[in-house]
Amino acid sequence: MRKEYNTVREVVGPLMVVDGVEGVKYEELVDIELGTGEKRRGRVLEVNGDKAMIQLFEGSSGINLGKTRVKFLGKPLELGVSEDMIGRIFDGLGRPKDDGPKIIPEKKVDVNGVPINPVARDYPEEFIQTGISCIDGLNTLVRGQKLPIFSGSGLPHGEVAAQIARQAQVVGSGEKFAVVFAAMGITFEEAQFFIEDFTKTGAIDRAVLFVNLADDPAIERIATPRMALTCAEYLAYEKDMHVLVILTDMTNYAEALRETSAARKEVPGRRGYPGYLYTDLSTIYERAGRIRGRKGSITQIPILTMPEDDITHPIPDLTGYITEGQIILSRALYKRGIEPPINVVPSLSRLKDKGIGDDKTREDHADTMNQIYAAYTSGIEARELATILGESALSDADKAFAKFAEAFDNQYVNQGYDNNRSIEETLNLGWELMKIIPRGELKRIRQEFIDKYLPLEDEGDE
């Protein structure tokens, strides 16, 4: 029988200090009963001698120090997991919020997870098709990868997230695929957008949603990604599914961490964030991957809004160190009405070369990717040159590259949020656009591929 305490000494923001405790452990779950009979939950954040600091999940309003009883449960925060979670919507602490039946768990799992032994990790190398040309063609996502999306305030990262969740698939394998979607600190309107989009398009049938709203306690926000990843690990490593985890918005998560750190009076690091922000983020991001001998995999797409579009801000900066690349949304492209406004030049998938090729996508993928990058950057330079010196200063090749860059933005990037392109369509569109460039300028593609995919009779100007 667990002992109850009524020795609450002080409450500061979301934190409570209890005196005279015995045998209490870090991360232990706590039941708190107020004088009114209302029950709340918390977890042990720190133990010092006979004092325990508790983090309250539901906030501290209405707590009377003398009448509050605290009971330590002797176990960490857990999530009851089951395959029945697929198709359901939960709050940030894993409680159903879709009026469906209660989940009967197959087992209960500690949400903090167990680190994957680096030796047991398998190398990510199988292609995942998102249906978005800028990602599939130029910044390929592979199973087990962590590929964040860097956005800015007001940019349509929600639409991009919903599109990926709707369209992502493992091509031609017939293997089981699921999406675990965790939203942290989003508005009610955003939550409705995601829920309606998933329901209307049928994506909900293979998805699990964890939704923490902006007016929910900040402490719940810290638990939400861990809930989602615990569910993903169960589906991937025990039910052999390929799971795509989308986490939005990691900036709200980091803000909640900063709020708790300030309440604990910890010495702040850069921009007021705790010094352990890197370590904390890594405990989330590093739960992606593939394990040798297991069929399933976890692929992660964290989404974060860069405060003031500053890529050197601590959250995108540290995220970039831990993950394998980034997809960057551009405000300039957004203002031009391009959907999705993905800026392919600074975007990068560090594992793209591992997930493409003859037996994965198509033999010409690597060459066309390199050529499109080169041509697009040359086109941007030519456009800038024309702005300064006038179009008459451009050579014929420069004019062709500038024309290519314009067509690339309007046709390749600007595909809309409802257009699901197969990798074949994306590669074919790349070849179609390369007809604008003189054949002699295609220096990054092997001649055999030019002969096969761009025969002479198809050449427009030659």
Image: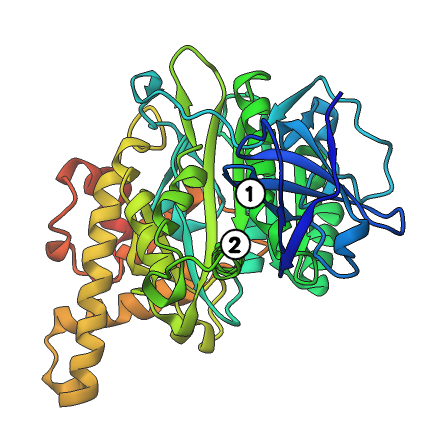
Q: Please give the residue where the numbered disc 2 appears in the rendered image.
A: 253
Q: Can you see residue 332? A: yes
Disc 2 crowd, CA 10 A, few/some/many (<14, 14-19, 20+):
many
The dot on residue 225 is 1
Which quadrant of the view contains residue 39?
A: top right
Dot 2 or dot 1, earlier in sequence: 1
Is 403 situated above or below 83? below
Q: Residue at x 46, y 72 (%)?
A: 334
The outermost residue toward the right is 36
Give how far across and how far down residue 342 sits, in percent.
40, 61
Give how far across and how far down residue 256 sits, in percent.
54, 57
Marks 2,1: beta carbons within 8 A: yes
- Callout 2: SS: helix
Q: Is residue 16 left or right of residue 258?
A: right
Give how far across and how far down residue 90 sits, in percent.
73, 42
Indicate the amino acid at tag 1.
Pro
Q: Quadrant of the C terminus?
A: bottom left
Which quadrant of the view contains residue 80?
A: top right
- Callout 1: SS: helix
Is 273 situated above or below 201? below
Give how far across and how far down residue 230 sits, in percent.
57, 30
Q: Residue at x 34, y 28 (%)?
A: 124
